Image (cartoon, rainbow, N blue to C red):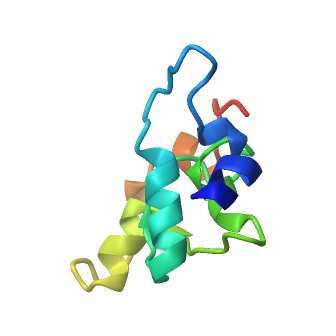
Amino acid sequence: MEIVRTKAKWLNPDEAGNNPDPADPWLVAVAAHYKYVVVTNESQTSSVKIPAACRIDEIKCRCISGPHFLYEVGLVKRIDPAHISADAFFAKGQTG
């Protein structure tokens, strides 16, 4: 947790104790420790989201999107790009 707190500061609450999702740093820390995979639909290209924290060298845990999770566990047999939001796929409209 200390590595997440220092290396992925954007996941931590601000000075007022606010954080849109205070579970985010814990999810990343637990996933990294136990070698779990984080599943999130946050932008994979953002520099201030869970996937960015997962890519930090000292953390290094795998992070995939919901459709990829469904494919990997066998609930869907193929991912059809027509069924994925173009904005989400190309990270349009994402900030950070």
Residue at x-position 75% and y-position 64%: 56
Left/right of residue 80 with respect to residue 44 in the rendered view: left
Quadrant holding the C terminus: top right
Whole-percent x, y for residue 37 in the image: 45, 74
Count of residue discs = 0
Left/right of residue 25 with respect to residue 73 in the rendered view: right
Residue at x-position 60% and y-position 40%: 11
The answer to whether residue 40 is seen in the rendering is no
Judging depth in this view, the residue of 38 and 69 nearest the camera is 38
Whole-percent x, y for residue 81 in the image: 47, 62
Relative to 40, say whether 14 is above or below: above
Whole-percent x, y for residue 1 in the image: 57, 58
Quarter of the view holding residue 9: top right
Residue at x-position 47% and y-position 70%: 31
Return the residue found at the far top. 16
Relative to 6, say whether 64 is above or below: below
Whole-percent x, y for residue 52 in the image: 68, 55
Left/right of residue 44 with respect to residue 83 in the rendered view: right
The answer to whether residue 37 is seen in the rendering is yes
Return the residue found at the far front. 2
Return the residue found at the far left. 75
Quarter of the view holding residue 66: bottom left
Residue at x-position 42% and y-position 72%: 68
